[in-house]
Image (tube, grey):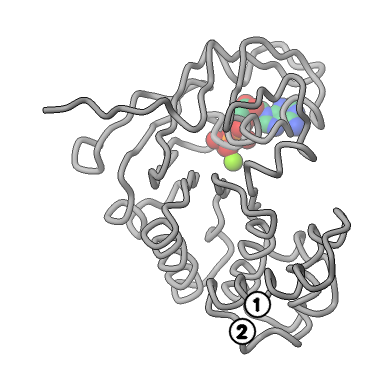
Amino acid sequence: MVDITSSPIAQLDQVSYRYPAEQWPAIDRCSWGIDEGAFVLVAGRSGSGKSTLLRTLNGLVPHFSGGQFGGSVVVCGDSTRGNGPGRMSRHVGFVFQDPEAQVLASRVDEDIAFALEQRGIPVGTMRKRVEELLDLLSIAHLRDRDPATLSGGERQRVAIAGALALHPRVLVLDEPTSQLDPWGAEDVLAGLARLNDDLGLTIVVAEHRLERLLHRVDAVHEVHSGVASDAMTPEEF
Ligand code: ADP
Ligand code: MG
């Protein structure tokens, strides 16, 4: 068979990290590669280091969190050493657990346009981009709603659309369905599977409730004491 293995889109090399004033490292010499186009599940019990690892991918760790950082994280050719979350947002979209904490405007379309507006993207381009994102996440009918009036699942899809506004090649989500009802969770996960299938978007999602996600992903990495395992197939896991 021809080896067409490409270099990973995201690569952690011997990453160690300690939060400020903490005695023990939250990440301990972790090397971890993520293949382009993969739909990756990050599993592991609470406190194992999933959130901390995900936050290294866009530089939130250590640029926002402070603390002591060693090793290197490179995504789409850029190291988080010289590039903080602002610059890494060109490569990595990030969605957090709590949909309410991510609301940026009082209309869905303005919320999605937020990152574009901040970067001074021309209005015409911005409108077109927002339309594409509304379609992509099946939320066009919600465009003029106030995010505060949406269900959790709808709001998370708005957050995903916003995270994709700058056309990153990697989407990282930290327990995006943990605060949703089963229907909302299903809508969000089905949306992710579609983004992965249709756009080839690389998706990295941390979850500790696995049953809804296992059958959709390509690879599972289990985190123990701040170290991600090698890739397992869902069956192996
Ligand atoms: P998970 O997402 O798997 O639950 P975390 O990455 O949140 O794990 O936490 C990993 C370790 O880092 C835990 O021991 C946790 O207590 C610690 N930790 C997480 N966030 C902070 C923080 N802001 N300050 C200090 N320690 C933290
Ligand atoms: Mg977490």
Q: Where's residue 179, x and y in %?
A: 59, 63
Q: Where's residue 193, x and y in %?
A: 39, 61
| Mark 1, secondary structure of its residue | helix
| Mark toward the start of the polypeptide (2 vs 1) | 1
Quarter of the image that includes the N terminus: top left
Quarter of the image where one finds residue 198: bottom left
Vertical placement of residue 60 versus 108, above or below:
above
Q: Which residue is mark 2?
A: 140
In the rendered view, does 193 fall on the left or right side of 3?
right
In the rendered view, does 34 fall on the left or right side of 105?
left
Q: Nearer the viewer, mark 2 or mark 1?
A: 1
Residue type at the position of mark 1: Glu
Residue type at the position of mark 2: Ala
Q: Where's residue 25, x and y in %?
A: 64, 14
Q: Quadrant of ligand 1?
A: top right
Q: Where's residue 187, x and y in %?
A: 46, 73
Disc 2 + disc 1, Cβ < 8 Å:
yes
The circle on residue 33 is none
Q: Which residue is mark 1?
A: 131
CA–CA distance in space, label 2 to label 1: 8 Å
Point 51% across, 73% down: residue:
184
Callout count: 2
Point 75% across, 75% down: residue:
127
* Other residues around mark 2 within 10 Å, as few (<14) / some (14–19) / many (≥20): some
* Other residues around mark 1 within 10 Å, as few (<14) / some (14–19) / many (≥20): some
| Mark 2, secondary structure of its residue | helix
163 vs 235, nearest the viewer: 163
In the rendered view, does 75 fall on the left or right side of 190?
right
